[in-house]
Image (cartoon, grey):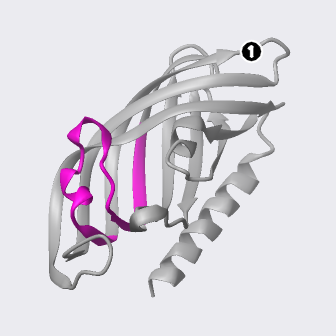
Amino acid sequence: MKNNKLRLALVLATAFFTNSISAQNFTIKTNALYWSTATPNLAMETKMGGKWTAELSVGWNPFTFSNNKKLKHIAIQPEARYWLCSPFAGHFFGVHAIYSHYNAGNVKMPLGLFSKLKDSRFQGDLGAIGIGYGYSWMLPGNHWSIEAEVGVGVGVTKYDKYECATCGSKVGSETKTILMPTKAAISLIYNIK
């Protein structure tokens, strides 16, 4: 059932962006900060009219590292953006949603985020909504740009918790609502005009 929902979301998003490609601007991008977690990722953004754009990003991490360290997940994040000057340049504000299915454990996160990941393994689903602020810099040549964005929001996660990251028994299931970072991006962008 979960796979069917994921497939439906991807089909609808693809149809949405395919119909929007006829707009004058369309970008393809990748988030370098996301790559630092060994997560391949790709995003598409298109102009919707006036000062509005829509972005869809996808990240997938299928890897298990030494000592059974893992941040395995698939994440899909649509976002609507309002640009203060003109689309794809300068300041913008965004509203986004996230869906992620994850299996993570034996990881020490920076800034003390999700501190229980170091000693336990968690497997479940996360849904979140958030707001973001960003800025995009055009590079010489009009096809490349760099963008930075940060976001914060509220997430609801339902997960199973296991004793240790390696081999532990299931110790319970839980649902939590959390205030959380929803976006941290430094992206390299190719602008298709």
Q: Amino acid at mark 1?
A: Leu
| Image quarter (top left, top right, bottom left or bottom right) of the N terminus | bottom left
Residue closer to the observer: 189 or 70: 70
Residue 191, quarter of picture: top right
Horizontal and vertical percent position of residue 167: 30, 81
Residue 71 appearing in the image: no
Position of 100 with respect to 31 (left or right) is left
Horizontal and vertical percent position of residue 149: 47, 28
Q: Which residues are magenta?
A: 95-124
Above or below: residue 30 compared with residue 190: below
Above or below: residue 177 compared with residue 28: below
| Image quarter (top left, top right, bottom left or bottom right) of the C terminus | top right
Residue closer to the observer: 132 or 150: 150
Residue 172 appearing in the image: yes
Assess whether residue 114 is covered by the magenta stretch: yes
Q: Which residue is mark 1?
A: 139
Residue plotted at (19% across, 76% down): 163
Assess whether residue 8 is covered by the magenta stretch: no
Horizontal and vertical percent position of residue 50: 61, 26
Residue closer to the observer: 15 or 70: 70
Position of 129 with respect to 175 (left or right) is right
Residue plotted at (60% across, 32% down): 187
* Neighbours of disc 1 within 10 Å: few (<14), some (14-19), many (20+): few
Above or below: residue 58 compared with residue 5: above
Q: Element under label 1? A: loop
Above or below: residue 19 compared with residue 91: below
Residue plotted at (49% across, 44% down): 79
Residue 47, quarter of picture: top right
